[in-house]
Amino acid sequence: MLSSSDLPDVFEAIAGTTGGFCDLVKLLRLDPSQDFVFSNLREVDFSNADLRGFDFTGADLRDCYGTDVIFDDTTILEMADVQGSCFATYRRERLLFLSKRGASIMYEALRVGDPYEVSNWIHSRLADGLDRHPILRKADDETVTILCQKLLTDEIDLTKRADLFYNLRGITRSPESLRELLLDVLARHVRNTPVMQKFIFIAGSMYGGDQLVGQALLTLTKAQNEQVRETAFLTLSRTSFFLSNFAQLRSSFMNDANRNIRQRLLMTSALSLDRRSLSVINLNASLSDVSINNILDYNELLVEGLAAQIATTLKQRAYENERRIKGENPSDSSRRGAISVKDATMVIARQEEVLCATPVIKLFFATDQPERYKKALARLKSKNADHRRKVEGRIAHGMARK
């Protein structure tokens, strides 16, 4: 299809792209309507590809995956092998609605029906094998499975969705169909943030070691939606896939586009420790109501100069509070801004503890400075143990008084 003289220019053009499937199709001058019939496309990443109008008749599409993949009834999948791919669930849905006249009526009954009634049906049918819904009573197990899978990704009441998530294994029936459903959601529903966040968590929990699911989650760390990216990073950080792709994930996480994510994670972790921990990760040394823009980023923490600024602010605040409470007017005004090495060291020590408690970031901190990480983690554990003993002591004291 290309002459040998054209190949160097084409390869140079390909090198200048992201390597997306549709970019390659265009540069290689392939015809979507005929050049992929009976082709071997096994394990292809279709992320961000618009596959409308593609003819994949008889093609080997096993284990294909991707995020934000566009395909519809103009995407021909006749006789294609879609086992274990992001197309499997979609094709089952399409075949059901084409072959069963009552399928669309059943689906609408679930989609717009009373949340309590539908949730009760979902639970009773999938958990007990009973069916109390008049319209769906004659539906076979395969039909129920496909309808529930489609319902899961539609704009429905949260009560229904919660029951569907709770019965996810009952809906999919087998590990293979569950995997296919996960890939389908990651491919087709990346713009539906609530669904994506829940499914990313489920995908990581159930299939964290699966290479294809892991690749799809890895792609989601570059999604346009910030919430989706954050959920993808958090989920991957709990899987073995994170360590096996550490350099790539680190580069992606440290991108400027994810600054808000890093700062939000740090602020949340500091608040979970105590207000004093929050004060040491922002230059205003604020104890509460801190704007995310004032939170120091990962590479700004543990810097002696910034720690000294924070220590100075904390010292000034303590000085002013003491003066207001005691009504004193110290003659030595130099005390107001004076800090010691110990003050700055305390700030850095608390910053280390915040880093140890922050998801994703703690993995980078442990890799960059393992000794500091171990010591800070030991301090955190000791503080938690002390806090637990104090709480237990108060409870015991209260019970004794009764």
Image (cartoon, helix red, strand yellow):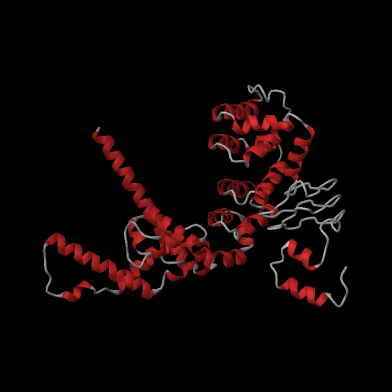
Q: Position of residue 135 (x, y in %)?
A: 67, 24
Q: Quadrant of the C terminus?
A: top left
Image location (x, y in percent) of residue 142? 74, 33
Above/below status of 347 relative to 87 = below
Does 268 sit above or below residue 252?
above
**Is 370 placed above or below 275 here?**
below
In depth, the one of 205 and 263 nearer the eye is 263
In the rendered image, residue 392, in percent from the top left (x then y), is placed at 33, 43
Where residue 320 sits, quadrant-wise, is bottom left
Q: Quadrant of residue 25?
A: bottom right
Quadrant where the N terminus sits is bottom right
Could you tell me how many numbered marks the image carries?
Answer: 0
**Left or right: 363 with respect to 37?**
left
At x 87%, y 76%, the residue is 4
Residue at 73% in and 44% down: 90
**Residue 7 in the figure: left or right of residue 233:** right
Which residue is pictured at 62% across the width and 41% down the height? 154
217 and 342: which is toward the camera: 217
**Image side of residue 13 versus residue 385, left or right:** right
31 or 337: which is nearer to us?
31
Tell whether 222 sits left or right of 25: left
The x, y position of residue 17, in whole percent, is: 70, 69
